[in-house]
Amino acid sequence: MNGTSTERRNARLLGSLRWWNPDRPVASANDWLMGERLKHRVEVASIRLGQWEALRRMGETATTPGEYKEAIRIGLHRQKPGGTPEPRWPEAVLSSLLEEMTSLSKPDTGDTQKELDLQLAKLPAQAQEIRDLIAVERLRAFVDALVTRVKAERALQEEAE
């Protein structure tokens, strides 16, 4: 691919980011966090802030939703010498997080998605790559919103104490 083709391709990929609703990952993060607090209050509270920050850095090089979720699944386990991986987070919380991410990696519904599908029909060779890029960006926004909310709430708790 020559320079001009690469530039055009990158412009299309970046332009694809306007095809997802940025409010959806934030709402999902808030809903997930509140739901997990109700189900697993002690477990969620026991997750150290550094582990939440590490979550934000996991999957930085992922290019597909599957790669991103796998990087998080692996990152939230620690390898014991000579043993099997052990979860850093409570298993119920980790499973719930990965389930929410699976749900969130699915395309938005509605008119915007229909228009995106029409546009992607013109780019069959890059269509899946663009869909993956949108899904990964949505997942990154979810994790970022989740970590930001946890940090803000913990800072407010510390201030109140």
Image (cartoon, rainbow, N blue to C red):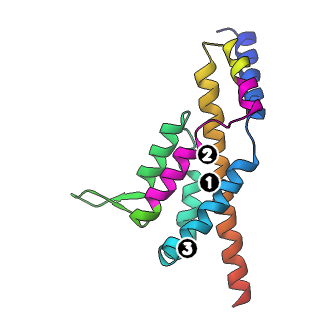
In the image, farthest residue toward the front? 110
Q: CA distance from mark 3 to mark 2?
A: 23 Å
Q: Residue at the spot x=58%, y=23% of the render?
A: 128
Tag 2 secondary structure: helix
Location of residue 6 with respect to 156 vertically, above or below: above
Secondary structure that dominates the magenta span = helix
- Between residue 97 and residue 14, name the one nearer to us: 97
Amino acid under disc 1:
Val
Residue under label 1: 143
Q: Residue at the spot x=75%, y=11% of the render?
A: 4
Tag 1 secondary structure: helix
Where residue 9 appears, x then y in whole percent?
71, 17
The quadrant in which residue 160 appears is: bottom right
Mark whose residue sits in front, 3 or 1: 3
- Give me the disc on residue 139: 2
**Tag count:** 3
